[in-house]
């Protein structure tokens, strides 16, 4: 499936470090924290590159989680006999 990501929160950790929360598909269970240096966050190009990478990771993790759930559902109820 396709994923959509957005920054839903930012936080100043110190003068030199900021954190953003990235959310996938509007689902809070996918929230992913990404920290960046203030100098990166302040520079439009570096900020965009940093966020693009983090958003890609967030979307990939959401897909992995969906695949994991789908896979584990298939394991439900399988009886293994041990002799
Ligand atoms: Zn997603």
Image (tube, rainbow, N blue to C red):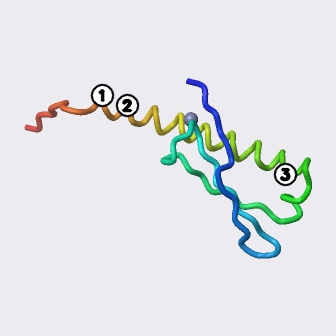
Q: Is residue 33 left or right of residue 37?
A: left
Q: How many residues crowd mark 2 within 10 Å: few (<14), some (14–19), many (20+)? A: few
Instruction: From the top left corner, tell me how far across and down residue 74 is, in percent.
Output: 30, 28
How many angstroms separate mark 1 from mark 2 (CA)?
Answer: 5 Å
Residue shown at the point (86%, 59%) measured from the top left: 40
SS state under label 1: helix
Q: Earlier in the sequence, mark 3 or mark 2?
A: 3
Q: CA distance from mark 1 to mark 3?
A: 41 Å
Q: Which residue is mark 1?
A: 74
Res. 53 mark: none
Mark 1 burial class by Cα count in 10 Å: few <14, some 14-19, many 20+: few
For marks 3 and 2, give the one nearer the viewer. 3
Vertical order, 10 against 24 (above or below): below
Mark found first going from the N terminus, 1 or 3: 3
Residue lying furthest left:
83
Q: Tell me the quarter of the image containing the C terminus.
A: top left
| Image quarter for ligand 1 | top right
Where is residue 70? Give x, y as percent. Answer: 38, 30
Residue 78: quarter of image:
top left
Q: Are marks 1 and 2 in contact (CB under 8 Å)?
A: yes
Q: Is mark 3 within 8 Å of ligand 1?
A: no
Residue receiving disc 2: 71
Q: Specify the label residue 47 is tagged with.
A: 3
User: What residue is at 89 percent from the left and 59 percent from the top?
Assistant: 42
């Amino acid at each position: 499936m396709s994923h959509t990501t957005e920054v839903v929160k930012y936080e100043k950790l110190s003068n030199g470090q900021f954190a953003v929360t990235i959310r996938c598909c509007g689902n809070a269970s996918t929230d992913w924290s990404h920290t960046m240096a203030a100098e990166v966050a302040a520079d439009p190009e570096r900020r965009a590159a940093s966020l693009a990478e983090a958003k890609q990771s967030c979307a990939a993790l959401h897909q992995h989680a969906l695949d994991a759930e789908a896979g584990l559902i298939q394991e439900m109820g399988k009886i293994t006999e041990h002799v």
